[in-house]
Image: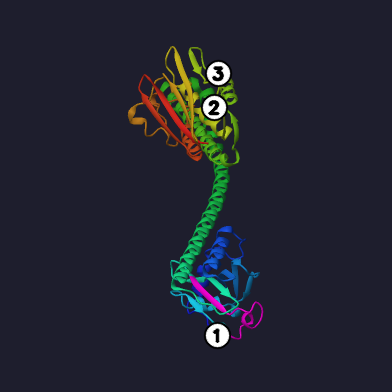
């Protein structure tokens, strides 16, 4: 007899495809369940099957050598017709549905079948966990219950597989979107840079060619245009820097000699006279992104140098490695940050410097990049500060 098709077959089949499981490779977790089902039920054969449109596909098998069968010959095609209860056939040769089945009349001469449906949260049966024997057999109520429990575990594995696959697809789409945004930012930045550059150039020409004819107020306005254009140019470069920096981390993890890293940073930074930077000694080798750490530390130390207003400036770098975390500290005795500003300093384009003291070399991008990098490294960054006394930045990374 050809098994009937469920009334909700189209929806059931669509639900099956959302699990992305068909034709996947064997997995030990599933194989452990089929082996356990066979041992509990004392049968030589156990399968985890999924009923596709025209075939029965076998995800896991124990005691059988089969990967798929025609759906019309699949015992489990009947199991999915009653998703709320198991199908148990003690003697298949005496059952009109199965007595002429090729797997009953011929090899492997199945005579007993018990299957529990694998049902989704939406109520759709995808297939079954089943056990089989080549002779008449029966199962106690305890063994049937055990088979149901194992069936639920199979369903949990399928749901986990679906979630992992969905996350993988989302990750791929996100990476593709990031790549597109990076390309878009390059194009937009190029298109914006040209008019900004021209605006600054024309303002400079006005000052050079007509400066003697302009009064002080107009000169001030023109100078403001030049500074604003320069600031806009810096913002554009900051956006490009941000989009590039937050993308490379996953490709740049390896063994980092922190002593060498500190030497490299000290070589790059040339503090003005009167500012002393104290680097730690005898540091370990850790597993991290060298480029990321260099960007974070260079930015924090560079800011500590840049905004130090003391005659004797002091910057202390410290490190503590404990368990799976490394904690870095950058402490200075500079001008400090107002308490009202502390929660804002990691925002993109935010600068603490008042407009009247505007520093046109600062874009407010650096600390945003630092926070993003630290977060992507599995860590956290915080700051403590007191005006006119200094600031302490502390960040952790996962090793």
Query: Which residue is denoted by mark 3 in the rendering?
Result: 270
Query: Which residue is denoted by mark 2 in the rendering?
Result: 205
Foreground label between 1 and 3? 1
Residues drawn in magenta: 99-117
On screen, residue 96 above or below 155: below
Foreground label between 1 and 2? 1
| Residue 369 visible here | no
Residue at the image position 48 percent from the left and 12 percent from the top: 274
In three-dimensional space, the C-alpha distance between marks 1 and 2, rounded to whole angstroms, equals 94 Å
Q: Nearer the viewer, residue 254 or 337?
A: 254
Instruction: Judge left or right: residue 96 versus residue 335.
Output: right
Q: Residue furthest left?
A: 340
Element at label 2: helix
Query: Which residue is denoted by mark 1 in the rendering?
Result: 97
Nearest to N terminus: mark 1 or mark 3: 1
Q: Nearer the viewer, residue 15 or 95?
A: 95
Task: Pinpoint residue 145: horizontal percent, then vertical percent.
Answer: 44, 69
| Residue 367 visible here | yes
Q: Are marks 3 and 2 in contact (CB under 8 Å)?
A: no
Residue 145 lies in the magenta stretch: no
């Amino acid at each position: 007899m050809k098994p009937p098709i469920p009334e909700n077959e189209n929806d059931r089949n669509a639900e099956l495809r959302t699990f992305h499981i068909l034709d996947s490779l064997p997995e030990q977790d599933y194989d452990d369940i089929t082996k356990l089902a066979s041992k509990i039920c004392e049968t030589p054969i156990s399968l985890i099957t999924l009923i596709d449109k025209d075939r029965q596909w076998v995800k896991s098998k124990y005691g059988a050598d089969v990967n798929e069968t025609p759906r019309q010959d699949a015992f489990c095609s009947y199991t999915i017709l009653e998703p709320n209860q198991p199908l148990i056939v003690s003697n298949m040769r005496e059952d009109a549905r199965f007595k002429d089945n090729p797997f009953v009349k011929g090899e492997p001469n199945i005579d007993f079948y018990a299957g529990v449906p694998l049902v989704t949260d939406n109520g759709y049966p995808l297939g079954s966990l089943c056990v089989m024997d080549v002779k008449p057999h029966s199962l106690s109520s305890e063994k049937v219950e055990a088979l149901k429990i194992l069936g639920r575990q199979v369903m949990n594995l399928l749901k986990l597989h679906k979630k992992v696959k969905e996350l993988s697809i989302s990750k791929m789409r996100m990476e593709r979107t990031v790549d597109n945004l990076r390309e878009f930012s390059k194009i937009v930045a190029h298109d914006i840079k040209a008019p900004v550059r021209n605006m600054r150039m024309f303002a400079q020409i006005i000052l050079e060619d007509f400066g003697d004819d302009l009064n002080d107020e107009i000169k001030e306005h023109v100078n403001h245009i030049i500074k604003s254009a320069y600031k806009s140019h810096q913002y554009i470069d900051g956006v490009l820097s941000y989009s590039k920096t937050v993308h490379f981390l996953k490709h740049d993890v390896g063994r980092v000699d922190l002593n060498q890293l500190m030497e490299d940073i000290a070589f790059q930074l040339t503090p003005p006279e009167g500012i002393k930077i104290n680097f730690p000694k005898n540091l370990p080798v850790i597993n991290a992104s060298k480029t990321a750490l260099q960007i974070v530390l260079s930015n924090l130390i560079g800011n500590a140098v840049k905004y130090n207003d003391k005659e004797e400036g002091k910057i202390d770098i410290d490190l503590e490695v404990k368990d799976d975390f490394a904690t870095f500290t950058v402490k200075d005795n500079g001008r400090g940050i107002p308490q009202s500003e502390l929660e804002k300093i990691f925002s993109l384009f935010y600068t603490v410097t008042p407009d009247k003291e505007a520093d046109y070399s600062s874009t407010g991008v650096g600390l945003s990049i630092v926070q993003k990098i630290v977060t992507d490294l599995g860590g956290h960054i915080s700051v403590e500060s007191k005006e006119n006394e200094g600031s302490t930045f502390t960040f952790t990374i996962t090793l």
